[in-house]
């Protein structure tokens, strides 16, 4: 009798604590005088830049990288609830991106930055180092292959067949069997919770980052 073909999908999930946190922040002010609004944002942005520069050390941190964009300005004439157009309001905004490796120091910096007029945080992006991410992806892929092998072996045993031999292996959805990879949301992602601190400084506790891998594999199982 001919061999029996078995096609399966293997998946794996690996978790690891976040190693880097990039703060995406902005500093924005508004008012009736364009020059004063612009000057105020430049002044407050300078305070933030000084605080970040003092922490910046690419090799050891606590800040390993940062960047700042030029101040952007615009004006608008808002409307009130009665449909009347109000006087011109001038806006100025600057963006700041700061990468931390020390999360305790990140919490203290955010607490200090919160006292700067117009400061706000758009989001905190949690990540792994490139080397760690590559290591975990390799581990996840290997585990996904092992799961596929175990799954195929279980199917073969249920059919009373003797073991399996791999004949094809591919990333999920590439074997042409109509199977599609599960959407895992793209890049590794982690949320964080704010924990209370005794000294009133913000403490961020990120959830572990999840690395996922999926493979499709085709095996043949030999009849006894």
Image (cartoon, rainbow, N blue to C red):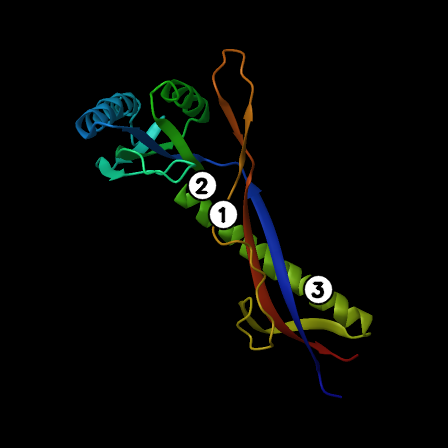
Q: Is any atom of residue 21 visible in this view?
A: no
Separation of residues labelled 1 and 3 (CA atoms): 26 Å
Give the image location of residue 203, x and y in percent: 50, 22
Point out the frontmost of discs 1 and 3: 1
Of callouts 3 and 2, the N-terminal one: 2
Q: Residue at x 78, y 75 (%)?
A: 161
What residue is shown with label 3? 151
Give the image location of residue 191, x and y in percent: 53, 38
Where 218 falls versus 28 (above or below)? below
Where 207 falls versus 107 (above or below)? below
* The C terminus - image quarter: bottom right
Of callouts 1 and 3, the N-terminal one: 3
Q: Residue at x 39, y 40 (%)?
A: 83
What residue is shown with label 2? 128
Of callouts 2 and 1, the N-terminal one: 2
| Residue placed most toward the observer, 46 or 6 | 46
Q: Residue furthest top?
A: 199
Quarter where residue 117 is shown: top left
What residue is shown with label 1? 188
Disc 3 secondary structure class: helix
């Amino acid at each position: 009798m001919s061999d029996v073909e078995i096609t399966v999908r293997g998946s794996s999930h690996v978790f690891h604590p976040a190693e880097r946190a990039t703060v995406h922040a902005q500093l924005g002010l508004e008012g009736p005088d364009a020059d004063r609004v612009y000057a105020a944002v430049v002044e407050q942005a300078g305070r933030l830049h000084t605080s970040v520069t003092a922490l910046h050390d690419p090799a050891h941190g606590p800040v390993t990288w940062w960047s700042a964009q030029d101040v952007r300005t615009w004006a608008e004439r808002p409307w009130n609830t009665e449909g009347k157009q109000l006087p011109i309001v001038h806006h100025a905004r600057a963006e700041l991106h700061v990468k931390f490796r020390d999360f305790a120091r990140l919490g203290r910096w955010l607490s200090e930055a919160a006292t700067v007029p117009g400061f706000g945080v758009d989001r905190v992006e949690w990540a792994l180092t490139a080397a760690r991410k590559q290591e975990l992806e390799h581990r996840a892929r290997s585990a996904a292959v092992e799961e596929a092998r175990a799954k195929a072996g279980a199917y073969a045993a249920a059919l009373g067949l003797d073991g399996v031999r791999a004949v094809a292996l591919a990333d999920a959805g590439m074997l042409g069997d109509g199977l599609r990879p599960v959407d895992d949301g793209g890049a590794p992602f982690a949320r964080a919770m704010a924990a209370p601190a005794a000294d009133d400084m913000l403490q961020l506790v990120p959830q572990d980052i999840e690395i996922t891998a999926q493979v499709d594999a085709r095996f043949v199982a030999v009849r006894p």
